[in-house]
Amino acid sequence: MRTITLINGDGIGPEISNAVIQIASAANVNINWEIQTAGSEVVEKEGTPLPSRVIDSVKKNKIALKAPVTTPIGKGFRSVNVQLRKELNLYANLRPCKNFEGIKTPFSNVDIVVVRENTEDLYAGIERMADENTAESIKIITREASEKIADFAFKYAVNNKRKTVWAVTKANICKFSDGLFLDCCRLIAQNYTNIEYKEILVDNLCMQLVQNPEKFDVLVLPNLYGDIVSDLTAGLTGGLGLARGANIGDNYAVFEPVHGSAPDIAGKNKANPSALLLSFIEMLKYIGDYSSAEKIENALLKTLREGKILTCDLGGNASTSDFTEEIIKNLKH
Ligand code: NAI
């Protein structure tokens, strides 16, 4: 039996984690959860939202499933998410977005994979007040990280039979930083002659994504644009409640939804657990348990397709527990 670290997060984190634990157990998935708490409630007891025991657990088990953790705006501790990605060198953030049958959106053929650089850019956290009225943030882009993420995107395209990789930047304005990122993408593209390589500016991409999302395939972006664009693509296919994600490095992988801790609905039994469940399904595929992944995915897709029991974000009025029970019921059919 394989042990997996489960960081159950805060806000809606514990509710959606419980849903996934119940579904995994009903599907007889052969894993043992090592539950690690992190986030706002841990700070009071342990003085940090990300105690070293959490990192140690992921290092030991190599794989983790992670629910969202709150990052206070403008003050307090550094983001647990950013810190975890840095400490484990999870340099690639993978966010696939595809339409779901039964979930109505303005588009029907969206199938986009966002590959976001995960360790640098404005997330390096180098900020200061230059004087009382002037704030400065430093955007770090390195050749090493840019070549690595570009290579990851092209490898992903090859392994998943995708046709095109688009490099997304604002290199017309950020000539040095995004210019370097673009140079690295161009260089790496030369090693993958069977994959088409295209470039687009991030503002133009956003406009085209809401007009013709069907034309896009794999997108590779620096950290900040990747963060924003992946919420946009999540919106194209049913919203944050359905958007899965993974943070992948050479030694460790942490699977987590795109969404945050949703404080507005936390503790109300309203959250949609699908994004965490879909991230779990990706995790099962990653560790080679395709049969459990397929079984759970079919039960979730059936629940969405039938549309009888859906959470509020999907236009229904079911609770997290009702929705979870329906998926468990559908595991058996
Ligand atoms: P959010 O993603 O938590 O919420 C945005 C909106 O989507 C809210 O209206 C929320 O109710 C809804 N929503 C999100 N997930 C949902 C779900 N599973 N089911 C139903 N509705 C859902 O974004 P927000 O409000 O900007 O961030 C809240 C906190 O989460 C912040 O502290 C932020 O830093 C943190 N965060 C953490 C992430 C992580 O742990 N990886 C990622 C993004 C944000």
Image: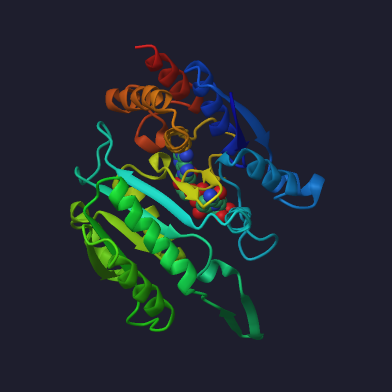
Specify whether 206 is left or right of 64. Answer: left
Q: Is residue 315 above or below residue 114?
A: above
Q: Is residue 290 above or below residue 53?
A: above
Q: Is residue 154 in view?
A: yes
Q: Could you tell me which quadrant the N terminus lies in? A: top right
Q: Is residue 254 above or below residue 21?
A: below
Q: Give the image location of residue 34, x and y in percent.
A: 66, 32
Q: Quadrant of residue 215?
A: bottom left
Q: Residue at x 40, y 81 (%)?
A: 174
Q: Residue at x 62, y 41 (%)?
A: 9
For this rendering, which residue is in front, 56 or 257?
Answer: 56
Specify whether 24 is left or right of 87. Answer: left
Q: Residue furthest top?
A: 332
Q: Give the image location of residue 327, x and y in percent.
A: 41, 21
For this rendering, which residue is in front, 326 or 286?
Answer: 286
Specify whether 26 is left or right of 34. Answer: left
Q: Residue at x 60, y 59 (%)?
A: 86
